[in-house]
Image (tube, rainbow, N blue to C red):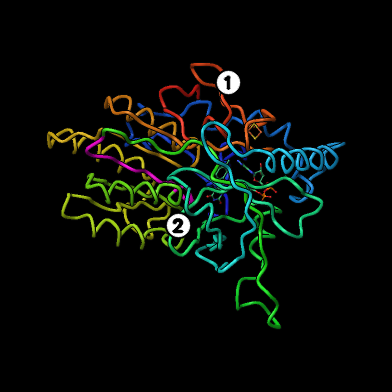
Amino acid sequence: MGAAREGVSGGARGVFGAFSPTAGATGGRGLYTAGRACGKRDGNDAAWAVSRQAAGRSRAPGAAARERRQGTNAARIGRRTEERNGVALVNERARILGNAEAGPNLYLMTLEAPRIAARIEPGQFVHMKVPGMEAHVLRRPFSVYARDAQAGTLEVLYQAVGFGTAHMAGLARDGASDAGAAAEAVELIGPVGRGWDPAGATRALLVGGGVGAAPLFMLCERLVGSGVRADVVLGAQTASALACRGRYEALLSAGASCGCEGPHCATDDGSFGRAGFCTSLVEEALAAAAGQGAPYGYVAVCGPEPLMKIVAGMAACADVRCEVSLERRMACGIGACLSCVVDTAHGKRRACVDGPVFDAAEVVW
Ligand SMILES: Cc1cc2nc3c(=O)[nH]c(=O)nc-3n(C[C@H](O)[C@H](O)[C@H](O)COP(=O)(O)OP(=O)(O)OC[C@H]3O[C@@H](n4cnc5c(N)ncnc54)[C@H](O)[C@@H]3O)c2cc1C
Ligand code: FES
């Protein structure tokens, strides 16, 4: 998902790759167009010009000092924060066990982090301090793709979009570094945030766009493990960017006895599955489930914001509860700095601790 689609604004693209809704994205009916949101820049972009230097653009005056200050504060608050919002936060140094290419501009990092692996819930994230980034001390937030609580490991699927993630892609992993150098380690604060809440649903639809497929995988495991019928729709620019497809296939075939289906895939270039955006598959899935007399009780979506907005609209029309995982630039990651606010029907909320998962009906898009 690295190559952004021409003409899609940086703000709308978010970090999960390009997505530009068109009339065709909704099956031509134009019911769910994202409107202005498709091209709008997030207000946080202006305030968060701290990474412009890495992207080859000019850096806002005082940005480095501000970033250092916020990073130091985050570390200090992180150290002293044992319990916040009912979630025990852990500060853990995690050895990199794997850091392999997983698709175009996509990497899969495996981390040894037993304390966080034991606690993390689907949809929560870790706030990562990357070694060798002294000039960029802010941590980077990443959802957890998979965990093995027994082995004490976490996996993060990430897209190289800027300085931090490009630097991460070059970090040495266990046993694979040149000249036998030791594996590197990152510092993690986690588990952070409020994850998915499919409570009460007997059938669920999960929709992942680009690297947004990863934060839904643990939810899918949880649903399949509890015998809930889960259907999955994945969208990406190309077949090779459908990095999570194989794991979903294996998981959903294990859940076939409770009717799990998919993953149903769409690629922008038609190289795998349906050609075009995955929204047409979502619309069909919602209609088919209602037609079968087994409507969904829950929709979860993660990906570019325009995709989430469109799917949220479709779910609302079908009268199905929908949750979205929102991305914001984050500084402290623990609710203290207000850099990550989201407008909701109940006022401003912090994506890091009140989210990143929100009820789609409450989000002011
Ligand atoms: C809760 C949460 C979970 C996330 N999970 C994942 C994940 O599982 N996999 C993944 O690849 N990414 C994920 N992200 C996004 C990831 O944190 C950013 O891609 C990363 O911080 C970028 O760091 P950088 O130094 O490479 O980019 P920078 O050099 O800082 O910025 C490069 C470009 O990316 C944009 N950007 C950077 N961070 C964000 C952001 N948070 N939201 C929108 N645009 C951004 C900038 O505006 C800029 O255009 C998540 C973000 C949040 C808030
Ligand atoms: S990142 Fe500081 S309040 Fe959310």
In terms of image quadrants, where is residue 99? bottom right
Looking at the rendered structure, the secondary structure element under dot 1 is strand
Mark 1 nearby-residue class (10 Å; few <14, some 14–19, many ≥20): some
Q: Which residue is mark 1?
A: 348
Tag on residue 208?
A: none
Calculate the distance from the C-alpha at mark 2 to the C-alpha at mark 1: 31 Å
Q: In the rendered structure, which disc, 2 or 1, sits on the residue that comes first in sequence?
A: 2
Residue lying at 64% horizontally and 51% vertically, measured from the top left:
128
Q: Of residues 181 and 42, which is closer to you in this image?
A: 181
Judged from this view, the residue extending furthest toward the top is 346
User: How many numbered dots are placed on residues in this image?
Assistant: 2
Residue lying at 27% horizontally and 24% vertically, measured from the top left:
319
Q: Of residues 250 and 92, which is closer to you in this image?
A: 92
Q: Position of residue 89 (x, y in %)?
A: 58, 42
Q: Which residue is mark 2?
A: 147
The amino acid sitting under disc 1 is Lys
- Where is 251 relative to 228, above or below? below
The amino acid sitting under disc 2 is Arg
Q: Of residues 83 and 74, which is closer to you in this image?
A: 83
In terms of image quadrants, where is residue 360? top left
Q: Position of residue 348 (x, y in %)?
A: 58, 20
Residue lying at 20% horizontally and 33% vertically, measured from the top left:
295
Q: Is residue 207 one of those drawn in magenta?
A: yes
| Residue 330 in sight | no
Q: Position of residue 258 (x, y in %)?
A: 17, 50
Q: Position of residue 361 (x, y in %)?
A: 40, 23
- Magenta residues, as a range? 201-212
